[in-house]
Image: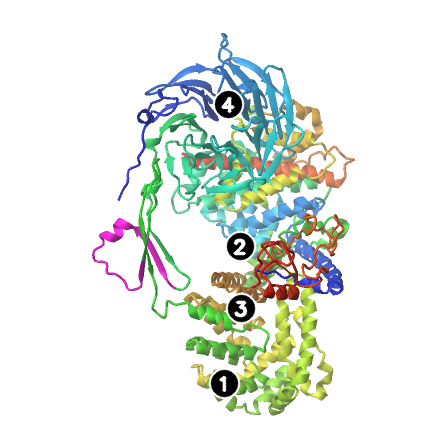
Amino acid sequence: MIICANKMEYPLRSQCQRVQKQVMVNTEKERASLLYMHALVSVDAVSHHMASHPQYLESFLRSQHYILHMDGPLPLPCRHYIAIMAAAQHHCSYLVSLHSTHFLRVGGDPVWLQGLEAAPPRLRLLDHINKVLAHQPWLTACSHIQTLLKTGEQCWSLAELVQAVVLLAHCHSLCSFVFGSGADGVCDLAPLPKSPNGTPPAYSPFDAANGNANVPDITRRRSLDSSCEMFLKERIHKSQEEREKRLLHTHTLQQTELEEEEETDVYLAEPSRFISDPDFRYQEFARREEDHFQVFRVQDYSWEDHGFSLVNRLYSDIGHLLDDRFRSVASLPSSHSPDLKRAIWNYIHCVLGIRYDDYDYGEVNQRLERDTKLYIKAVACFPDDTKAPVCPLPWASLKPSERIHVNLLIMEARLQAELLYALRAITQYMIA
Amino acid sequence: MEKMARVTTALGSGNSGSGAISGRTMFCHLDAPANAISVCRDASQVVVAGRNIFKIYGLEEEQFVEKLNLRVGRKPSLNFSCADVMWHQMEENLLATAATNGAVVTWNLGKPSRNKQDQLFTEHKRTVNKVCFHPSEVYMLLSGSQDGYMKCFDLRKKESVSTFSGQSESVRDVQFSIKEYFTFAASFENGNVQLWDIRRPDRYERMFTAHNGPVFCCDWHPDDRGWLATGGRDKMVKVWDMNTNRAKEIHCVQTIASVARVKWRPEKRWHLATCSMMVDHNIYVWDVRRPFIPFATFEEHKDVTTGIVWRHQHDPYFLLSGSKDSTLYQHMFKDASRPVDKANPEGLCFGLLGDLAFAAKESLINSDVNRKPYPGDRRIFFFKKPEQTEQFAHVSSVLSVFETSLESGRMDWFAKTARLYLLSGKPFAELCDHNAKVAKELNRPQVSTTWTMVRIMFSDPANPNHNLSNKLGTLPLINSFSMKEMGAGLCPDSRLDRSKSEGRTDAIHLEPGNSHISNNDENEETEGSDGQAEYMFGDAELDDDDLYSVEHDNPAEEHEYTLPQEAFPLRHEILDNPSAPEHLQQDKADSPHVSGNEAEATCLTPIESCSLISTSQPLYTPHLPASFFCPVVREMLCYYAEQGDVQMAVSVLIVLGERIRKEIDDLTQEHWYTSYIDLLQRFQLWNVSNEVIKLSTCSAITGLNQTSTTLHINCSNCKRPMSNKGWICDRCHQCASVCAVCHHVVKGLFVWCQGCSHGGHLEHMMNWLKSSPHCPAGCGHLCEYT
């Protein structure tokens, strides 16, 4: 067989072309990344704040996009509705209104937004596990899963449930991040003002891009499967457009029901509509420990060994995406020592009832001051705008990116904790 | 024919060194989930360790008997919470456990006190995942931990003698090599496996990536030196041959869940047992040569199996297992279920060219008396030689191949069509005509007619296409159409439409005949500008990233399409109007190109509808846009795709390009493309498949061509990779690619023999090998030029 290396023929010309190509590629990349930013960041302003950690932002956006928009057993409106339910648990009006908008865009029934009672019973069934996961995840039990999967008219399939659980955990932890960012004064995520056609006001991604030189980096790292990424971006962009189009369409249809529409708008920003039991809050895990609640031992059920395999099996590829998030948050460059990061991580898991056999919890007290612990606990366990604001992170001298780093750690630790509880319950269900 | 497994019990076989072993499948309840188990050397006792259990059971004929509870004290510390346990294979009384809190503990059963704890090493910072005694050295213990370190302990000392840093993530397993005294293997959470020499703690001897994701376990083959089995979260078991320079994967078994443990079966060279970390509770015994079906399975456990161990190192018939369901089992091999017995040894497959192959058990086919010999029936008999040892049930099967004689079943047309179709490079109408002709010649009138209709629906009546069709003169439909030259009255109407766009097409309409003639006259000129244009687009192609590369053929087509404009001196100023910008800002519904198109179709429809389309003529006003046809065409494409003729769907899609693309959603398009490309590749029509990939507008498809496009070359002198782009190697400062014939640097087409890797200028090599069969470099290799 013969192989010909064709390009060697005109060295000079090809060099010129290479240079030219380089230029093209650069502008192209930049354009693409802006597109990327535009497509996603405008969807949620949260990403602005993560933009100071581009490596992390990339994996975050990937997983979020996958959960909300890509292949999965749940229909799109349902996903956003579940996200609304999850965000409402923490009274996060920002996320609630964001997802309400999305819910309408993907063709959800506006009536559902009047409150939980208006939602189909199947989604209402999810309320219990939502509430438990949000506030006292250690209560998650096999029986909850059983109730949901019990055959009947309103039953869930295992695959749907796993997606719902991932979605819930994702949104709960995102509430923590939103709250943390707000409390820190890094940003102010007020509920979105409603523009007449229901789209959120355009958050210019360009400001973020200009403000932070790191941003274009997000595409650089993945040159390996850049084509895939391009594809993803294009998809995102296209689906955006499509949704806009559809939205316009529905609006023309619904012009007659304009009044009703306005009414729903009022509901949009009212998270309490989606909560059934507002008194169910976080309680100290330590106090309950003496009762019958077993401590969750990571050595017996860990993300790497057990959680990953289960979630990836029932909702393909999500395991890798989440794994990527946990890894990238762990490997974020930071001025903190790895010990401090571990202390934060383990402390969050500890207040949620998860223990590491191989960790000396005395270290938490050594590494974290009391104020810091208070902050972490508040953000992780009761991120609620409506309650009294917590004291900001005492590390006032920290750069914003460092503070965001802490918030990211809290978010991911919480996400993993909720996933572990939920997945363990599902595993127990499967064995039983 | 059911075949019983020929399994002999240990009693009957009287196997080496363990004549006393006997027993039956049995189990006992443990108080708590087990994490690991281990047996003592004489196979009479087993230790079970877990978070809340640490006990020794005696293995008796009929049952397990609890011998000793090592978990003592009122509130046992975390040192008792074991992740792993190992019983020393030389010293009866010695056990080691890996604690979840990071401690490594040894236990001496000979101690008189209740607490048998001997030594405690607390050097690891994280959970210790694995402990391993040296197979022949009494005092040497190795541990691997979550913190990424491996430590070697001398049990006569209070602390570790050496620490090995894997420089990567957590260590999941460590195993001393059985045959090589100093070697051990370690597997890591990031998918790597490292080989270490126990004497050299500074650096591993070898490292390779074994799995995608954590490698949970590894096991050295007891007999074959240098075979290592690894199991990972990616649900695979791989067998590596470490004897070669680079670890070579020699077997791979795909399981259905992540692999938690793997153990070679004693005395059976090809067998290994696995259990899974999650979801799947069974234990499988695999013959690595038959990786698709487990040789045997044990299905007793109700929760995941956490520890498996062969009871005796020379007895393949007893397997012990502990599980999270708090049971300890002894499995007899004769009681294992054999999935192969339940499997249907029948297979059915369609060949590429419509042949059908069918394999079934011999007995089944022979017993079928009514079966008549089929003329096209070639029978091939396969016999698997039964081996003396227990083996997969021996099945002899008959393979029948049925050749199809039906025209419908044949796929010849597919390959021919694929090869002959033109998808780009000519004006739209010409492409359609060409393809129609191809289809007609292959006796596919419907497809042919479809092409013609597509042309008529979408093309410009006064464009060169009709001269072309005259020239070709093959398709009566077109002829009939061109005879019905449109009424002049239609033209002004269509012009209204187009007045906003450039005037070129107007001109054509005004003087159809003129355009015809001038086109013919101006052939040379046309060609000249054509070349120029292509050069331009060629450039664009090189400059673009994949975003734009899809477009570059359409501009070419577009250009040709607009060629006639050059025939009109008055319209001179639009001569240079390149179509590229127009295309870059694609998607503009009101681009001149499209509107022109609409107008063209407008002129055309009424005439055509009389002959081809059955709908009533008056419906079509002269202003009917081309987009009017889109739904019909879309339906047509879907119809063809549904019928299995995805070739047609894709070809029309490509030829119509922008005209129809918007009508069909991306996923469907992508689906069609992938199916067609898949088919093409099966027929080894690489060129066509590549063309289709190139012409597709789905970025997912065009992306196919963008992967693994790098060619790494080594310097021919120093054999090391060339890093820079020139012809001179950085390292040895020699010209790297020298022609073996003329000894000059090759700066163009370099051709080399893949046998001896010598080569040179294409022409030189060609000439040389015409006269001599040997390599010009004098290496003695018999090169071949094909």
Q: What residue is pinned by disc 3?
A: B663
Look at the numbered discs 3 and 4 and tell me whether their residues touch, using CB distance below 8 Å.
no
User: Marks 1 and 4, Cα distance to the nearest angstrom?
Assistant: 84 Å
**Label 2 CA crowd tier, 10 Å (few <14, some 14–19, many 20+):** some
Instruction: For mark 1, give the secondary structure.
Output: helix
Earlier sequence position, callout 3 versus callout 4 = 4
Instruction: For mark 4, give the secondary structure.
Output: strand
Residue A335, how many percent across, how many down? 74, 35
Q: Which mark is residue B85?
A: 4
Q: Are marks 3 and 4 on the same chain?
A: yes
Q: Which residues are magenta?
A: B354-378
Q: Are marks 1 and 4 on the same chain?
A: yes
Q: Residue at x 49, y 18 (%)?
A: B90
- The chain identifier of the residue carrying mark 4 reads B
- Residue type at mark 3? Glu
Q: Residue at x 42, y 69 (%)?
A: B412
Name above or below for residue B355 compared with residue B170: below
- Residue type at mark 4? Val
* Residue B590 is inside the magenta segment: no
Instruction: For mark 2, give the secondary structure.
Output: helix
Residue B6, how many percent across, how many down? 30, 35
Q: Which one is in front, B141 or B717?
A: B717
Q: Are marks 2 and 1 on the same chain?
A: no
Look at the numbered discs 2 and 1 and tell me whether their residues touch, using CB distance below 8 Å.
no
Name above or below for residue B479 compared with residue B208: below
Q: What residue is pinned by disc 2?
A: A110
Q: What residue is pinned by disc 1?
A: B478
- Residue type at mark 2? Pro
Pair 1/3: label in front: 1
